[in-house]
Amino acid sequence: MQAALVARDVPLIERLLGQWVHRQGVSALTALSQELDAANPEAWAWWQTLQSPAPEPVLEDSMLVAAEPLVPLPRLEPQLPRATRPAPAPSHPAVVQLRAWLPDQETRRAA
C-alpha cells in the first residue's frame, strides 16, 4: 500500500483499500489510515485531497442569468389504429366441437 501511495497509483490504491476493507472491515480503516499517515504524511495527504469532494462553486449575483419561465410541453397521446370490430373467432373444428357443449344464448337468457 505504501509503494502504491508513493507511486501515486490511484487504481492500485483503490484496489488495495477495497481488499483491506473486505478482509479487515470498515472499522479497521482508521488504523490503516493512521499507519499510512505516519509512514508517509505527504503521500497520505495527497490521497486525502483526492478523496475529499470538490467544493461547490460560488455564484455571484452578477453571474446569474435570468431564466425564462418553463412552458409545459403539450401531452402527446399515442396514435393507435382503432379496431372497428373485434377479430372473428377461430373456426378450427376442435373449437366448433367445444362450442357445441356451451349453452346457446337463448338457454342463458331463460336461466
Image (cartoon, rainbow, N blue to C red):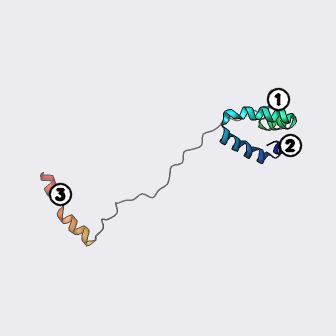
Magenta region includes residue 69: no
Which mark is drawn over residue 94? none
Which mark is drawn over residue 6? 2
SS at mark 1? helix
Q: Nearer the viewer, mark 2 or mark 1?
A: 2
Residue 57 position within the rendered picture, expressed as x and y whole percent measured from the top left: 79, 32
Q: Amino acid at mark 3?
A: Gln
Measuring 85% from the left and 38% from the top, which residue is drawn there?
Answer: 43
Which mark is drawn over residue 105? 3
Q: Nearer the viewer, mark 2 or mark 3?
A: 2
How many residues crowd mark 3 within 10 Å: few (<14), some (14–19), many (20+)?
Answer: few
Measuring 54% from the left and 45% from the top, which residue is drawn there?
Answer: 75
Residue 41 or residue 102, whichever sits in front: 41
Report the Cα–Cα distance between label 2 and label 3: 89 Å
In the image, farthest residue toward the left: 110
Q: Is residue 49 above or below residue 78?
A: above
Q: Of helix, strand and loop, which mostly describes the magenta segment?
A: loop
Measuring 86% from the left and 34% from the top, which residue is drawn there?
Answer: 41
Which residues lie in the magenta part?
Answer: 81-90
Measuring 73% from the left and 42% from the top, which residue is drawn there?
Answer: 17
Residue 30 position within the rendered picture, expressed as x and y whole percent measured from the top left: 73, 32
Residue 40 or residue 87, whichever sits in front: 40
Going from N to C along the chain, the mark reached first, 2 or 3, is 2
Q: Is residue 95 above or below residue 27?
A: below
Going from N to C along the chain, the mark reached first, 2 or 1, is 2
SS at mark 3? helix
On the image, numbered disc 1 is attached to which residue? 62
Magenta region includes residue 88: yes
In the image, farthest residue toward the bottom: 93
Report the Cα–Cα distance between label 2 and label 1: 44 Å
The answer to whether marks 2 and 3 mark residues whose Cβ atoms lie closer than 8 Å is no
Q: Amino acid at mark 1?
A: Ser
